[in-house]
Image: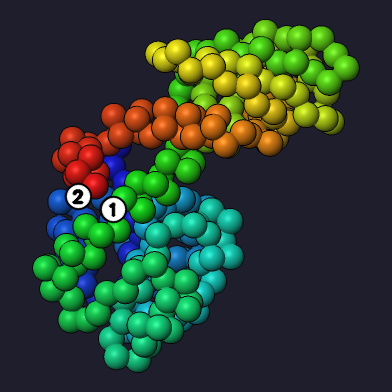
Amino acid sequence: MNLESLLISQDAALLGVLRPTLENIAVDVQVCAAIRPANDLLARSKFDAVIVDCDDLQGGGELLKALRGMQSNARSVAFAVLNGKTSTQEAFQSGANFVLQKPLTPLNATRCFNAAINFMVKERGRYFRHPVEMMVKIILPNGPELNTNATNLSEGGMAIRVVGKLPKEGRAKLQFSLPGSNISLELKGEIAWSDGAGHVGMRFVDVPQSSQYQLDRWLTERLQNKLPRRLQEYVSLR
């Protein structure tokens, strides 16, 4: 499972430096050469990193500023590529996490992405869903206890299978043990979605800090196991 990046640029020389640099650390590169299709792509797809050619692509600077307002990619790691028009300070004020300067050399690109890779992995972890077969006890407010099965788990919620219907209002108490561990968690959740056929998405709310730490650690271990070996080894050193 490689990380995913989007390069928004028409500069073939820039791509020539970035593609081998990113592929070396198991990051796939998708290229979009115009602003309108880039906006459409960012609206429907999630990327761990977004690289914007701010000075040599018309509208690049505006797209970088708009990125933080896009639901799918508001927290993606953003790279601004500059060529003498935009200052580094302006790029950071526009929402960039990292700045690259043209003409870009392989050495400078490597240094920048080496510094950024942990942030990209962390962003992947934020929406990573791990498939599970896990028993979950649901304690409804003023209602019965239900034993259900969870089918996937993320830092923000889980998908479960239920027989019958759950009340849409109110928060339920969720009790479960993380598979392959002796860690038991108790937290609250509310319905985020339901397909009417017994599949329900639960959003975690009011999660104790200790429980969030245990859940994030458990998920991070499983995410790293899914990453390519060269990326696993790189991240483990940091």
Q: Quadrant of residue 30?
A: bottom left
Residue 25's disc is: 2
Task: Pinpoint residue 138: horizontal percent, then vertical percent.
Answer: 71, 16
What amino acid is labelled 1 in the image? Ile
**Above or below: residue 15 compared with residue 185:** below
Task: Pinpoint residue 84: horizontal percent, then vertical percent.
Answer: 29, 91
**Above or below: residue 32 compared with residue 22:** below
Where's the N terminus, which quadrant? top left
Task: Pinpoint residue 146: horizontal percent, then vertical percent.
Answer: 73, 9
The CA span between labels 1 and 2 is 8 Å
Please report the residue visible at 55 percent of the width from the left and 29 percent of the height from the top.
211
Relative to the observer, which residue lies in front, 103 or 187? 187
Crowd around label 2: few <14 · some 14–19 · many ≥20 (10 Å): many
Asked if residue 43 lies left or right of residue 165, the reply is: left
Mark 1 and mark 2 in contact? Answer it, CB < 8 Å. Answer: yes
Residue 184's disc is: none
Relative to the observer, which residue lies in front, 31 or 131? 131
Relative to the observer, which residue lies in front, 73 or 225? 225
- Please, what secondary structure does the residue beneath circle 2 have? loop
Please report the residue visible at 82 percent of the width from the left and 9 percent of the height from the top.
144
